[in-house]
Image (cartoon, rainbow, N blue to C red):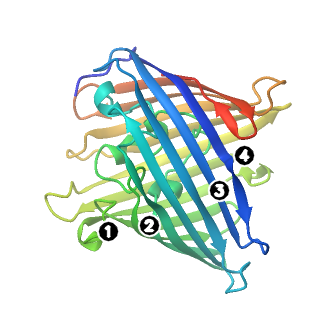
């Protein structure tokens, strides 16, 4: 794979996002069932450097929901979550860019599959969940970096580049538990199948073990804390030489939020390490900011800027700078021009 230079520039020519409210939410009369959907359309062009200058496009469809067993008058504390997801893509984006951190975290080879099918049971201050699910929905997750499109601002390259991880586009069979010790402290741990998404022989394909401790500061409004810090460690054990490496790593996710007038600010830092010699990506660090209501006349718009860097076993390190603006055209449609 050809080396990427610091000044390699991408432009996402058009990203049309029909937001999470794009498809109407449906609820049963008793409030037990809720569903929603989302459609993202994106096109990227490589303006300078990389391997190919041709554009690559993709369409991502998500639809799913949840069923609250308590609200359905079955039994208390249960939640069934389900979703389907599909991607239709034109062009191989990683091959065209030559990057570990490719510019669209929603790009994937064509697929349509059950993306989540889980059952969660609340047990006082603890909860357990099992089924088909995406690791990054529960671990190593950053809310403040969500607007950024580059893949490195989703699940860290230490996962995605070093082994076949159970996250987009390949969720896996897993189980996890979470305990809330106090309003500030939460701990969670889980295990996922190796080599997802195939379920055949899933228990014999290796496993990813992961644990995370989270500290959250006082909430400013709703459920949004002013500070959030997560420390985690993981170990991937291969199920055989043909499956993948045995390796380990650790990570940090730090976020802070504040309000100044009508404008809301957020900042984040991400850091991961996986120093074993079998790994392509050994260290990763990223930081950035998110501004909601950047202009007083546009209270629903958002602007985000981020920079990320991966240290590779070979070749040289790779650095990405990204700027993205989300223009809320209507309550259900947003346009997101993006430059990397």
Identify which residue is drawn at 35% across, 54% down.
165
Q: Give the number of marks.
A: 4
Distance in Å between CA atoms under marks 1 and 4: 40 Å
* Among the two numbered marks 3 and 1 on one chain, the one whose residue lies closer to the N terminus: 3
Q: Which residue is mark 1?
A: 199
Q: What element does badge 1 sit on?
A: loop
Identify which residue is drawn at 45% across, 25% down.
44
Locate residue 296, reporting x and y percent: 84, 24
Distance in Å between CA atoms under marks 2 and 1: 9 Å
Q: What element does badge 2 sit on?
A: strand
The answer to whether any part of residue 127 appears in the image is yes
Tell me where residue 69 sits by quadrant.
bottom right
Distance in Å between CA atoms under marks 3 and 4: 28 Å
Mark 2–mark 1 CB contact (< 8 Å): yes
Locate residue 78, reporting x and y percent: 63, 78
Tell me where residue 277 sits by quadrant.
top left
* Among the two numbered marks 2 and 4 on one chain, the one whose residue lies closer to the N terminus: 2
Q: Which residue is mark 3?
A: 36
Q: Which mark is residue 132?
A: 2
Vertically, is 267 above or below 223? above
Identify which residue is drawn at 40% across, 50% down.
169
Mark 3 Cα within 10 Å, few/some/many (few <14, many 20+)?
A: some
Q: Which mark is residue 324?
A: none
Q: Which residue is mark 4?
A: 226
Residue at the left extreme, as displayed: 241
Distance in Å between CA atoms under marks 2 and 4: 32 Å
Distance in Å between CA atoms under marks 3 and 1: 26 Å
């Amino acid at each position: 794979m050809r080396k990427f230079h610091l000044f390699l520039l991408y432009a996402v020519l058009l990203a049309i996002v029909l937001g999470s409210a794009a498809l109407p939410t449906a609820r049963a009369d008793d409030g037990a069932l809720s569903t929603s959907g989302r459609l993202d359309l994106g096109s990227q062009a490589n303006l300078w450097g990389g391997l190919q200058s041709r554009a690559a496009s993709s369409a991502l469809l998500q639809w799913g929901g949840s069923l609250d067993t308590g609200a359905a008058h079955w039994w208390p504390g249960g939640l069934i979550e389900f979703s389907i997801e599909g991607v239709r893509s034109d062009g191989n984006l990683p091959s065209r860019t030559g990057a570990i951190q490719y510019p669209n975290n929603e790009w994937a080879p064509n697929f349509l599959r059950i993306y989540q099918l889980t059952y969660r049971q609340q047990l006082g201050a603890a909860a357990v969940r099992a089924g088909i699910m995406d690791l990054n929905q529960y671990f190593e997750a950053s809310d403040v970096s969500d607007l950024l499109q580059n893949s490195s601002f989703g699940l860290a390259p230490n996962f995605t580049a070093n082994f076949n991880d159970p996250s987009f586009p390949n969720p896996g069979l897993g189980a996890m538990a979470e305990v809330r010790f106090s309003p500030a402290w939460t701990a969670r741990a889980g295990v996922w199948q190796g080599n997802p998404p195939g379920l055949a022989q899933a228990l014999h394909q290796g496993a990813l073990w992961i644990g995370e401790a989270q500290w959250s500061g006082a909430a400013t409004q709703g459920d949004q804390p002013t500070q959030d810090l997560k420390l985690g460690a993981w170990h991937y054990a291969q199920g055989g030489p043909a499956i993948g490496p045995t390796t380990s790593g650790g990570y940090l996710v730090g976020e802070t939020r504040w309000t100044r007038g009508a404008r809301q600010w957020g900042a984040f830092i991400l850091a991961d390490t996986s120093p074993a010699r079998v790994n392509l990506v050994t260290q990763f660090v990223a930081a950035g900011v998110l501004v909601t209501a950047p202009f007083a006349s546009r209270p629903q718009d958002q602007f985000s800027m981020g920079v990320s860097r991966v240290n590779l076993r070979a070749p040289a390190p790779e650095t990405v700078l990204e700027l993205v603006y989300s223009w809320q055209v209507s309550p259900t449609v947003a346009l997101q021009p993006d430059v990397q």
